[in-house]
Image (cartoon, coloured by chain):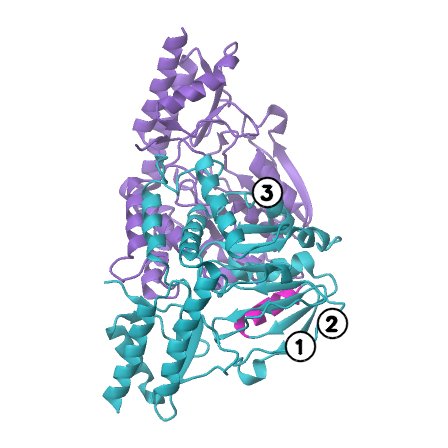
Chain colours: A cyan, B purple
Amino acid sequence: MRKHIFNAGPCKLPDSTLENTAKAVMELGNCGQSIMEVSHRSKDFQLVFDEAVELFKELLNIPENYSVLFLGGGASTQFATIPFNFLKNKAAYVNTGTWSSGAIKEAKLFGEVEVIASSEDKGYTFYPQNFEVPADADYLHLTSNNTIRGTEFFEDKAYDVPVICDMSSDIMSRPVDVSKYAMIYGGCQKNLGAAGVTFVIINNDFAEKNLVADRVIPTMWKYTTHINKGSMNNTPPCINIFTVKETLKWVKANGGCAGMEKLAIERCDMLYAEMERNSMFRPVVEEGSRSRMNIPFVMAEGKEDLMQEFLDFSVSKNIVGIKGHRSVGGFRASTYNACTITEVEALVAAMKEFESMKA
Amino acid sequence: MRKHIFNAGPCKLPDSTLENTAKAVMELGNCGQSIMEVSHRSKDFQLVFDEAVELFKELLNIPENYSVLFLGGGASTQFATIPFNFLKNKAAYVNTGTWSSGAIKEAKLFGEVEVIASSEDKGYTFYPQNFEVPADADYLHLTSNNTIRGTEFFEDKAYDVPVICDMSSDIMSRPVDVSKYAMIYGGCQKNLGAAGVTFVIINNDFAEKNLVADRVIPTMWKYTTHINKGSMNNTPPCINIFTVKETLKWVKANGGCAGMEKLAIERCDMLYAEMERNSMFRPVVEEGSRSRMNIPFVMAEGKEDLMQEFLDFSVSKNIVGIKGHRSVGGFRASTYNACTITEVEALVAAMKEFESMKA
């Protein structure tokens, strides 16, 4: 029986992504070969690849002169590749949680890092606003959504320096003004498809002109390599890219990024309303900083010892994935693009039933 | 209709890999989630991961104190990661083709590279033997099989320095004495599964003790990170690892590496015998250096203008993938583990029929 999936990533994917991937694993179109067997240099695969890139560009309204890349290694690899390519003297970082901290740690290996804003002192429960960016920074690095802590920003702002943003966990969940960014990147395993492929949206001029000139950078760690080779300097993760193409088709058929945003707001409004109402639970993130993708919550004061009991109860209700990240504890409902209202209703119903059982 | 697949990678995979992957895309076991949805931190996925690692260790008889890692980025990323971790002063490389040359190019970014043997002057048509390795080299780098040129070595030798070998295209096609190597690596998309995952077999002591001490290395580019985190420092390519597990199950059920070697010899003996006999074709690689995985051939002297015609003829016979690599031309039949005798018979029959048509 199919579960109600609230995993933090890998996570729920659209039924059509599963069905069409399963079919392509047996045979891609009518080409007599599996998506796992067909050459990455063949027309059959190039069609898949081009459709994924074109859907990316269309759905995010990506301006001319940006490339969409599909790479390996995950966003964590990008944490180092970004400063390797672009950190000459100093970079500005906003620290909003585990992933920002990881990016900062790697950047420090390559140069000076100025953490211009942080929510660390309040347990990462809010998203810092109105920070000033030093004009001499090579770039500003942001993390739009914090999977573990459940904070998110929704406004794309221009700054005086190029902006690079990790959107691993909220890409395609709202319309984004890509022109405000020099680069947007992330793992695909939340809103876009199977784990194993990393997307990079990058301004071609930025990639070339801001490359640190006097640093020796290996071929596979240069963005310009992948821009020039259309992500095929070596064999790309073909089946993973196929799953992205399928998920983007589904996003398009469901109203594009605006449609995803509407659904995301509906889902998290339902969950936050229940958490505020239900005497057994409380949310942890400040209003105004609340993520639509990851909704952490804890037992209400005095109810802490019921945590494991609710976790077991949720499992009995066919719900998986609401245990909080091992670094913070509590609960977390991750409600990515493919999470349905039906699934949210199941979780809300479980919370209500648990409250009435314990009242 | 299923094709006779001779692709150079991605390539033919066992039917059971396709069927079981398609099933797991719909639901992994009975867990109510797709292999693409289940958390990489869940027991359901850990079982898949552990089975892949255990099969790797069992089939290659890997000694204690080696780790098997599953990473992203492909073998081309390893070309740089290896010298980044281990090249302090000088490394010795054997140049046997495009992939060796790529590895040499990246190593030169990190230190001195001594190319101690090369087959470049004879168009990479043989595998150099009996080279001397400088005792002060940090490591010796070999490429066991050359996909593009079709040369291969089959003997695992000890040298006075640690040996690192790219086995992307012949891993699991013969028993390997892993103890002779400090590290073996490669893309999985030929003998092991879907593109998008890189295997690394590494001696744990080597990874730790030979790490260049005074070099700053990003977290994701250190082998010790992945050894310590069991390849899960970040989200691994889950579905790709699943396909490796499935293919290794098939390898085991079909006689293990010894069974694969027997089949490989049978396949390439059939093909080489036909090339020697058939008046329309000739092989290009010297006897004694011939790969069992990639068999390049050309039209016989005076028949060169029939090349495209034979290519079209092969397509009409349901055969795909025999066009030579764009850098060398001619033909190439790639006969990896999952390539069946039936497929080889189809190609041999096409060669015979073409000869009789043109006689």
Question: Residue B16 vs residue A144: left or right?
Answer: left
The vertical placement of B94 against A274, above or below, is above
Using the numbered discs, state the Cα–Cα distance from disc 3 to disc 1 in whole angstroms.
37 Å
> Which residue has dot 2 on it?
A134
The vertical placement of B252 against B268, above or below, is below
Mark 2, other Cα within 10 Å: few <14 / some 14–19 / many ≥20: some
- Residue extending furthest toward the bottom: A302
Q: Nearer the viewer, mark 3 or mark 1?
A: 1
> Which residue has dot 3 on it?
A229
Give the prevailing secondary structure in the magenta stretch: helix
Mark 1, other Cα within 10 Å: few <14 / some 14–19 / many ≥20: few
Check disc 2 and give the amino acid type.
Pro
Q: What residue range appears in magenta?
A: A97-109
Using the numbered discs, state the Cα–Cα distance from disc 2 to disc 1 in whole angstroms.
10 Å
Where residue A91 sits in the image (x, y, percent)? 69, 67
> Which residue has dot 1 on it?
A131
Where residue A141 sits in the image (x, y, percent)? 63, 67
Check disc 3 and give the amino acid type.
Lys
